[in-house]
């Protein structure tokens, strides 16, 4: 009897092993069906055209079409397709399915490799061959992109990480002008919410150059932009940070180097912000009704309070240095956006600190005239190394270190009229 049990157990294992590829194939088909269903939205339509499931492998054909009429018209105007079909060769593994996918009759030669676990989590790698594009209506214009790769993973919870590398992009115009980007890299990790990316992503380039047919009026070296956004579930607050670092920008007006910008939007009321973004993202053309619909949410956003902060802005221009930081805060409980906007502006508090060196003023004499006048008005203070501006924003007035007070609207109106 014991021997029979052993043989039965072995037979069961063998039967399970023989049936497992079929089970994996069935689970894989269900995962793909769910993924296709999730893709459908206001912008894109996706469907499974064909799915032939075999024992160790399957063949799938899926179709994607642009639904958004505005986006569709833009693609058609550029001579690009608005509908495409993807052919996938799928292999059944022990705990995953792997697929090699290509796009039928697509102008960009690309190949997508994916490995999907049975729980739906997927690793992917997209390889794009060198691509050269010339519009039919303007053959003198061309876009060339070198062989590129993007890879990462996505989970069933919507969490995503990616890395993209494009060695070079070149855009040439019929006038002889050209625009090139070298060493483009993007990466990120997080989760795409309905209204914003939550997590971190960055994009950097080694070099950007503009050529006007005779010379290069602008060249940029070693630039990086980083965006970070996070939600506080306990307080329903949203904050985002934007950082820009540029090694050097060479223009006909001079060389800017060591550019650093660190800007924060903090403590936004998440429900109000999400409602505003929902209105604006669903409006291809913003109407008066859309603006009116967003006003109650903007009122709520103001009432909850938030802040804008330039944590650092610094650069070197020639031999001179400039740095500045400021913060504006809308206190919680502020109201009257639609009934008394002046009271809202008067409720905003903040501070400003700016420093720039003598070398900067000496190199650009046109700055000196404004500084001399600002010193007389006790707005700017001269030091041994340069000049400083320190001020606080109180009751709609800028109050400087000297005690000089200037209404904020007095500074804003000339800019608004300009």
Image (cartoon, rainbow, N blue to C red):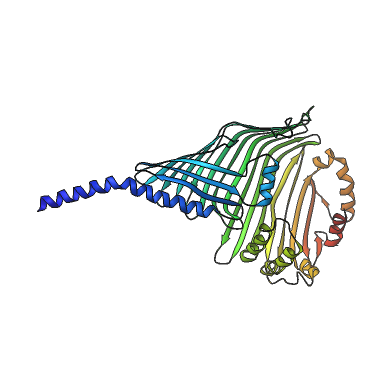
Residue 237: where, in percent of width, then height? 60, 64
Question: Can you say whether 315 is above or below 132 in the image?
Answer: below
Say which of 86 and 284 sits in front.
86
Q: Residue 404: in sight, yes or no?
A: no
For the point 78% across and 58% down, which residue is it? Answer: 391
- 166 relative position to 380: left or right: left
- 367 relative position to 236: left or right: right
For the point 86% across and 44% down, which residue is it? Answer: 367
Say which of 383 and 223 sits in front.
223
Residue 266: where, in percent of width, then height? 65, 60
Given the current orientation, which residue lies at the most extreme top position? 214
Given the current orientation, which residue lies at the most extreme left position? 1
Say which of 116 and 413 sits in front.
116
For the point 59% across and 42% down, which residue is it? Answer: 186
Question: Can you say whether 220 is above or below 242 in the image?
Answer: above
In this rendering, the count of numbered labels is 0
For the point 27% across and 46% down, which residue is it? Answer: 17
Q: Residue 399: in sight, yes or no?
A: yes
Residue 131: where, in percent of width, then height? 61, 32
Residue 406: where, in percent of width, then height? 85, 61
Which quadrant of the view contains residue 58?
Answer: top left
């Amino acid at each position: 009897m014991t021997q029979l049990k052993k043989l039965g157990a072995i037979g069961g294992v063998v039967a399970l092993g023989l049936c497992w590829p079929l089970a994996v194939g069935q689970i894989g088909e269900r995962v793909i069906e769910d993924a296709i269903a999730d893709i459908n939205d206001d912008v894109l339509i996706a469907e499974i055209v064909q799915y032939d499931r075999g024992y160790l492998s399957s063949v799938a054909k899926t179709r994607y079409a642009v639904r958004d009429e505005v986006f569709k018209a833009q693609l058609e105007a550029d001579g690009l397709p608005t509908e495409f079909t993807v052919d996938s060769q799928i292999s059944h593994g022990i705990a995953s399915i792997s697929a090699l996918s290509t796009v039928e009759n697509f102008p960009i030669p690309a190949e997508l490799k994916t490995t999907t676990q049975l729980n739906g989590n997927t690793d992917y790698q997209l390889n794009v061959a060198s691509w050269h594009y010339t519009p039919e209506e303007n053959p003198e214009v061309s876009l060339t992109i070198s062989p590129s790769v993007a890879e990462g993973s996505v989970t069933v919870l919507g969490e995503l990480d990616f890395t993209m590398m494009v060695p070079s992009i070149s855009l040439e115009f019929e006038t002889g002008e050209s625009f090139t980007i070298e060493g483009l890299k993007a990466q990120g990790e997080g989760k795409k919410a309905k209204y914003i990316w939550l997590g971190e992503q960055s994009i950097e380039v080694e070099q950007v150059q503009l050529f006007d047919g005779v010379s290069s009026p602008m060249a940029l070296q070693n630039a990086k932009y980083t965006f970070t956004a996070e939600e506080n579930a306990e307080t329903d607050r949203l904050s985002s940070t934007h950082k820009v670092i540029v090694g050097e920008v060479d223009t006909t007006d001079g060389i800017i180097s060591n550019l650093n910008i660190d800007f924060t939007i903090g403590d936004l009321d998440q429900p109000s912000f999400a409602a505003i973004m929902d209105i604006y993202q669903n409006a291809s053309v913003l109407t008066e009704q859309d603006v009116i619909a967003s006003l109650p949410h903007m009122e709520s956003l103001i009432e909850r309070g938030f802040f804008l902060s330039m944590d650092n802005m610094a650069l070197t221009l020639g031999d001179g240095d400039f740095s500045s930081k400021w913060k504006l805060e809308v206190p919680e409980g502020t109201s009257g956006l639609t009934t008394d906007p002046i009271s809202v502006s008067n409720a905003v508090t903040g501070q400003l600190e700016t420093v720039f060196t003598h070398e900067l003023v000496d190199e650009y004499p046109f700055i000196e005239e404004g500084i001399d006048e600002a010193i007389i008005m006790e707005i700017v203070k001269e030091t041994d190394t340069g000049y400083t501006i320190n001020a606080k924003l109180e009751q709609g007035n800028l109050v400087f270190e000297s005690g000089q007070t200037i209404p904020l609207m007095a500074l804003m109106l000339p800019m608004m009229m300009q």
